[in-house]
Image (cartoon, rainbow, N blue to C red):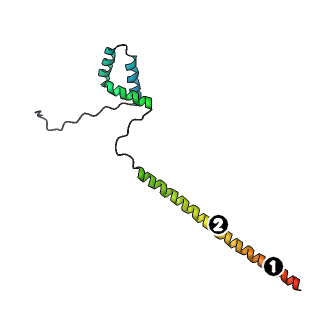
Amino acid sequence: MFTSTSPEVQSRAKHRTFTADEKARILAAYDAAASALERAALTRREGVYSSLLSNWRRQLAQGDAPKKRGRPANLEAAEVVRLRKELERLRRRLEKSERTVAALGKAHALLQMIAGESSADDERSKVS
């Protein structure tokens, strides 16, 4: 078993990440290598495996973006927020429509009242 004289906790090695430019550069250099020995030297120098290069080629061909780490987005929560906004918009539209109908009802009643007065005036003028 390994024992250390230092009381400090050893840090764990981090996974290396590659930018899209680095991936493209490494793939281009790998494809440009003339022999298998040159390709092997490149993979050792860059610290990558050939399977990783295959994955990068597949991602490039499919146009896949790298997967985000962490919790997946809560799609239901986003849908609830969207539906609440739509509900509020529809409530405002309903209130506006109800005010419009009430105003039209009052205008209709006023027009009927005016029409009733004019017909009563017409009858009075005929009688005299």
Q: Who's the residue at 44% across and 31% down the image?
A: 62
Number of marks in picture: 2
58 up-or-down from 119: above or below: above
Q: Are discs 1 and 2 less than 8 Å apart at CB?
A: no
Which amino acid lies under the numbered mark 2 shown in the image of this protein? Thr
Return the x and y of residue 105 as percentages of the image width and height. Answer: 67, 71
Assess disc 2: are there few (<14), some (14-19) or many (≥20) residues with their C-alpha within 10 Å of its C-alpha: few
SS for tag 1?
Answer: helix
Residue sitting at the far bottom: 128
Q: Which residue is mark 2?
A: 100
Residue sitting at the far top: 34
Return the x and y of residue 84 as percentages of the image width and height. Answer: 48, 58
Assess disc 1: are there few (<14), some (14-19) or many (≥20) residues with their C-alpha within 10 Å of its C-alpha: few
Q: Which residue is mark 1?
A: 119
- Quick one: label 1 or label 2, which is nearer the N terminus? 2
Q: Nearer the viewer, mark 1 or mark 2?
A: 1
